[in-house]
Amino acid sequence: MRKLVVGTFVTVDGVMQGPGRPDEDREGGFDHGGWSVTYWDQMMGETMDAQMPKADTLLLGRKTYEIFAAHWPHAGDEDATGAQLNSMRKYVASRTLDKVAWNNSTLLEGDVAEAVARLKEESGGEIHVTGSCNLIQSLLRHDLVDEFVLWTFPVVLGTGKRLFGEGTVPAGLACVDTKVSTTGVTISTYRRAGAVEYGSFALEDQEPASA
């Protein structure tokens, strides 16, 4: 079984919409695009480079695919990240696209959750999901995510698409790695750790509050 890893930039209040530029995603009247750009340092770049070789497949939603396909084919192979993205297998979940032109790209056919479940059954390295907020919601609803790499930026926006939306399946997680950039960005890796465990701080002889 291949591991499916969601790696995404989020604000402290969980917003993942439009991190890269002002016009990246204005859906819903969102006007805070580009909120991640000024926080990058050398450690973050090195961390990104270290994560890339673990994957041999990239899974993207339509909007993120179009952003990547408009940029990375022109970056040149001297850019290590661009070279890997251009050569690796890429699968695109879209209801509107009828073809994808970026090298080694394939449209997922049929039900997205079923198609992704089949990809996970294949042999190979990790499947990485980047950005792709709407796609991630489908993956969460069908309990297909094995690991999260969350880059939490010290920003609060109040509005925008959030990583964990309605329909997320409850799950316990284990934090297996955390590092902090010089700009205060926390990069944490969470792996599935079974079901949520519930308890109570009430004293054993304490009567439950009446309704």
Image (tube, rainbow, N blue to C red):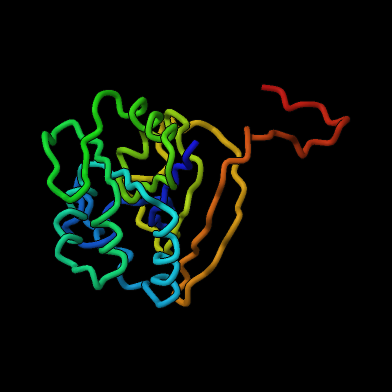
Which percent across, then down, holds residue 27?
A: 20, 45
Q: Residue at x 26, y 61 (%)?
A: 20
Q: Nearer the viewer, residue 164 or 132?
A: 132
**Horizontal arrangement in the rendering, residue 70 relative to residue 173 (left or right):** left
**Horizontal arrangement in the rendering, residue 166 relative to residue 82 (left or right):** right
Which percent across, then down, holds residue 131?
A: 32, 50
Which percent across, then down, holds residue 3?
A: 48, 42
Which quadrant would residue 50 be assigned to in this image? bottom left
- Number of numbered discs overlaid on the protein picture: 0
Q: Nearer the viewer, residue 205 or 197?
A: 197
Which percent across, then down, holds residue 100?
A: 14, 42
Q: Residue at x 22, y 39 (%)?
A: 106
Q: Quadrant of the C terminus?
A: top right
Q: Is residue 182 above or below residue 204?
A: below
Q: Nearer the viewer, residue 69 or 62?
A: 69
Which quadrant would residue 33 be assigned to in this image? bottom left
Q: Is residue 3 above or below residue 155?
A: above
Q: Residue at x 39, y 76 (%)?
A: 41
Q: Nearer the viewer, residue 103 or 8?
A: 103
Residue farthest front in this picture: 123
Q: Is residue 71 above or below residue 195?
A: below
Which quadrant would residue 12 be assigned to in this image? bottom left
Residue farthest right in this picture: 205
Q: Is residue 195 at least partly visible in the picture?
A: yes
Q: Is residue 160 at least partly visible in the picture?
A: no
